[in-house]
Image: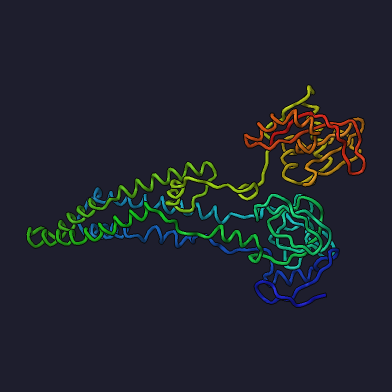
Amino acid sequence: MKNNKNTTAINVERFTPTAQSGLSSVQAKSRIDNGLINCADDKYSKSYVSIFVGNLCTFFNLLGLIVLIALLFTDAKPFDFVFVIVYIMNIIIGISQEIRAKKCIDRLSLISSKKSIVIRDGKETEISPDEIVLDDVIVLSLGNQVPTDCRILEGNAEADESVLTGESVSVKKNTGDVLLSGSFIVGGTCRAVAEKVGKDNYVQKLSAEAKKYKKPHSEIMDSLRIIIRILGFIILPIAAAWMIKSTVFCDIALSQSILNTSTLVIGMIPSGMFLLTSLALAVGIIKLAAHNTLIQDLYSLEMLARVDTICFDKTGTITDGNMTVKELVPLKDLPQEEIYAVISSIIGTLNDANQTATALKEYFGNEVSLSAVSRIPFNSKRKLSAVEFKENGVFAIGAPEFVLSKEKFAELESKINDYAASGLRVLILAHSEKSIEGDKIPDDFTPYSLILV
C-alpha cells in the first residue's frame, strides 16, 4: 500500500510498511536508486583549497615573493635565499595544522552504532546505519542507538536524548511517538519506521553546525596584519628610493642594486616574529592534542588562552558516554575470585547492552558459572538489576541508594561520597537470602563490594 507524502526536501512517494513485514526488496531498491538513503556526504569544514589559499595568499608572503623574484634576476648567492626557509616553515606549520583539524572534524559523528536491524521482506536483516532507506522498519531494543529520525509503529521504549538535548532524564516513547537520531534506547523494545534520512535528520543538522568553520577573531593575528600593512607602506617607498639612489646617483650596477635593495627589504620584514609566533602556537596545539583537544585553526589557541571561565553542561552533552571499571572495593571478607564469578554470572545471565553492562563485561567477563532461577533486568527507574541463583540467593548490582536500605546506605554514604567527589561513578554488589517474587526484589540486601566506574 502506498500513498503520496512530502518529505522535508522533495515530494516523494511514501510507503506504509507494517511492523511485521517492513519494506520489500523492490521498494528498498527503489529508495536506493532515488538516493533516499541514510547517508550524508556533505562536508562542512574548510576545504583543502581554501586552506592552501588562506596560508599562501597573504600580504606577508607577497612581500617575500617579490623579494624572491627580484633575487632570481641577480647574481645572488645561495646564502641570500635563507629567508625563504622562514617563509616555508611558517606556511607548512599553518597548512599542516589546519589539514589535521579538517580530518578530525570530518570524522566527527554523533552516530556511533556500526550495525542496525531492519525488517525487509518480513525478515530481520542487519545492515549499516548508512544503508537504511526512507520508510525502513527498524528494530530497536535496550542499548541500541537510534540511527535515523523515526516514528514508533509497535511497542514502547525509553530514550536517552542527553547527547542531543543535554537532559539526563530518559523520555518514555509510545506508539506514534518520534525517536530522534542519536538518542539511545535505555529500556523497552520497539519497531519504528524511518521518517527522515541523511542530512534531513536532526542529528545531522547538529553535526553540520558543529563542523562549520568560523574564522577566529585573533588579536595577535590582527596586530600582525596591522604591522605588515604599515611596514608595506613604509618598505615600498624606501625600497624605491634606495633603488633610485643606487642606480642613478651612485652609479651601481642594476643587478647589485637589486641585491642591495632586497637585503634591505628582508631586514625590514619581521619574518622571525611570524615564525616564532607560529612555533609557539604550534607547540601549544601539540600539547593540547596529547589530551585529545581539537584546534581548528592555529590562532584559535589564543582564544583558549584568554578564557577565564568555563561552563560545563550535564553528562551526555560533552562526554561520549563510554565507561570503564577502575577498581573493585570489597566490603566483605570473601575471595576476590568468588566476587568476580558472581558479577560475571550476572552479566552473562542478563546480557544487557547498555554502557554500564559493557564496562562490567570488559572488566569481569560474562562467563556464567552459577545457575540462574529468575532475573530482573536493569531499567532507568529501578537503577539496578538483580539475578537469583540456585542455592546462592539473590545478587543485585546498581546505585547504592537504590539497592540498600536507608540504614545500610547511611553506613557507607561517606565512603561512597568520597569516591563520587573524585569523579567516579559508584555501583554496589549486594546479596540477599530471600527470593525474587514477580518483579519485586528483596529489601534486605547486604553489601558485598563497591564497583568504581
Q: Is residue 114 visible?
A: no
Left or right of 264? Residue 280 is right
Between 37 and 229, the one nearer to me in the picture: 229
The answer to which image quadrant residue 126 occupies is: bottom right
Between 448 and 140, the one nearer to me in the picture: 448
Left or right of 165? Residue 367 is right
Residue 334 in the image, given as x and y percentages of width and height: 79, 23
Model colouring: rainbow
Picture residue at 21% right of the left edge, 59% below the top: 234
Between 209 and 341, the one nearer to me in the picture: 209
Residue 189 in the image, given as x and y percentages of width and height: 82, 54
As displayed, is residue 389 above or below residue 125?
above
Dividing the image into 4 quarters, which one contains the C terminus? Answer: top right
Picture residue at 39% right of the left edge, 57% below the top: 55
The answer to which image quadrant residue 209 occupies is: bottom right
Q: How many marks?
A: 0
Residue 333 in the image, given as x and y percentages of width and height: 78, 22
Q: Is residue 40 visible?
A: yes
Dividing the image into 4 quarters, which one contains the N terminus? Answer: bottom right
As displayed, is residue 113 above or below residue 443?
below
Residue 70 in the image, given as x and y percentages of width and height: 23, 60
Picture residue at 89% right of the left edge, 32% below the top: 393
Left or right of 219? Residue 399 is right
